[in-house]
Amino acid sequence: MRAPVLILGARSDIGRAVAHEFAARGHPLQLAARDAAGLEPDRADISLRHGVAVTLHEFDALATATHDAFVAGLPELPGIAVCAVGLMGRQEESERDIAAALRVMRSNYEGPAGILAVLANRFEARGSGTLVGISSVAGERGRAANYVYGSAKAGFTAFLSGLRNRLARRGVHVVTVLPGFVATRMTEGMALPPRLTAQPQDVARAIARAVERGRDVVHVRPVWRLVMAAIRAIPERIFKRMRI
Amino acid sequence: MRLSGWGRYPVLEARTHAPRDAAALRQLVATAPPLIARGNGRAYGDSAVHPAATVEMRRFDRMIAFDPASGQLVAEAGVLLADIIAAFLPRGWFPLVLPGTKFVTLGGAIAADVHGKNHHRDGSFRACVDWLEVMGPEGEVRRCSRQEDPALFDHTLGGMGLTGIVLRAALRLRPVETGWIRQTTVAAPSLAATMAALEAAEATYSAAWIDGFATGAGLGRGLVMLGEHALRADLPPGQAPFPAGPRRRLSVPLDLPHFALNRPGLRAANALYYRTGGRKAGSRLVGWDGHFHPLDALHGWNRLYGRRGLVQFQCVLPPARAEPGLAALLAETAGAGGGAFLAVLKRLGPQESAFSFPMEGYTLALDFPANERTLALLDRLDAIALAHGGRFYLAKDGRMSAATLRASDPRVEGFRAFREARGLTGRFRSAQSERLGL
């Protein structure tokens, strides 16, 4: 039997797509989100389509004190855990309202890093497993347009990199996913350039492939490697005056 | 945004919405009308477009329950028939009725009451639907079936989305032993021979490809393709009972220039297809996808027709007047019209319904590039079909006149009256329904 996959933030568009992708490959699923009971239609849909067992688990990424108990309460320790938790927020609001900014920071860094830290220790003790963190190219360089979100993603990317380094010789693999623009609820209404924009299903396929092939850092659309290399290469003296 | 049907003609500027749940949909029904639901955009013309509000239903795409004892599947309206096949064929179940593309949603199949190559035996899509849930003009959700509010059931199947928004349906799948089709091809040198072959066919599935360029004695010549679900015993040893997932899909990456599909080339290609088809006549095993959906393999094949798009003409003629009617339609097409790029003829069986397209007789579908010459030809084809007691398929239409529809179908008044009585006319409208006065 294939390894069970835990999906944290299973209600998000990417979380749902990842669930379908792994179920189609025969993996049983543990779907975790706030108000998990509300995911019953998805649970029924996925198990009907793919004939795999799917269980629902109440999970609040920001309630970090509950994370240990959450993992202990799973019917079994998953073989693969995918963290699709995140919150874009609105940059103007994050600038005005520090509480809103903190919510964005905690949702993209503290919560995801917290739960993956708990899972990492259990995976390490078992000596196997794969952790997948969905971070963002926004973390590659802070920009005026979304640096609150970007800074939290930068922290998460660094956390994943360090975790990978720590666990590389302990049988646990860590995948960092940098999706670029994705057409989801988070980006609804934004004018995204079609060539740079992936669908949630593209992200899900990239994740499943990265897990199977043991890749470390994956961009969903390879063009983002070039875009971000270019953005990183701009000298700060120039960058700070740009509207990008 | 600029929106059109599969034929990419006509193109309209339309406001679109893509609600995620019933509450958001209810909000739209209350505030956005007139509106029309849209599935996967496979109706050819303007059936699923309204400039004021077009409501995308693809996010309602969950399967809800399956009963392996009866083969009944309950699913949301945005589920594709392709999804149903992907999920259930490996378990030995197949849709009872499958139209010419598997990329239609359940809601779209219900709204157009689509038919397949087995209409003469199994009826239209309606035949496999046990019940429906429809969101009405006040946002209320009503279940209907042959017993429960049968008028709503009857008018929704074939009602082109004009009776409300289909949210869910229960449909019966058919048990199959394999995903293979035993396909037999018969070459027929004339219209009479093609019709005789369809008439004599005992197979579950039958349809004829017609050479849309042939004239004179060869008018209506074609290849009659018959299909039967293969049994396990029919498969050669070692053959997997269910063909592996869809073949690698090719896609048309750009709009071809309008001269790419030119008439001399197509005339030759049609003649060649007829001759090679005739030589390969006989029986063989083919995958279900190749039998039902040869065009689906070429993703975005509508782009072959270039930016101006394509239009399809499809009518059904009653049995008694079918042969002269079909001869006149094909002669007009191949003669003055310069040929149809794709022509398909099917035998339809009897049909009960309030407003569905099928009726007993022969249905002819003709594809053309959209241009002035085609539109003029289609007006002449309308007149020929009317003169032979024909009826038109609204899922293919993007240009017919209200007068033609009324002359072709005495049921229009009843359909319109149902809409009035239920308070639907102000809420649910498409560009097509406004054009046709439905």
Image (tube, coloured by chain):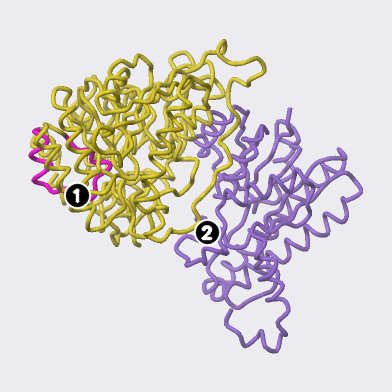
Chain colours: A purple, B yellow
> Is B302 left or right of B323, judged from the image as shown?
right
**Quarter of the figure that contains the C terminus of chain B:** top left
Disc 2, SS = helix
Other residues around mark 1 within 10 Å, as few (<14) / some (14–19) / many (≥20): some
| Position above or below: B400 against B245 | below
Q: Are marks 1 and 2 in contact (CB under 8 Å)?
A: no
Q: Nearer the viewer, residue B152 or A154?
A: B152
x, y (%) of residue A185? 50, 55
> In the image, is residue B93 part of the stretch drawn in magenta?
no
> In the image, is residue B395 part of the stretch drawn in magenta?
yes
- Nearer the viewer's eye, disc 1 or disc 2? 1
* Residue occupying image coordinates x 61% and y 85%: A242
Host chain of mark 1: B
Residue holding disc 1: B377
Let me know if residue B14 appears in the view: yes
> Tag 1: residue type?
Leu
Segment colored magenta = B391-410
Q: Residue furthest top?
A: B233
Q: Nearer the viewer, residue B419 or B354?
A: B354
Q: Quadrant of residue A79?
A: top right
Residue holding disc 2: A186
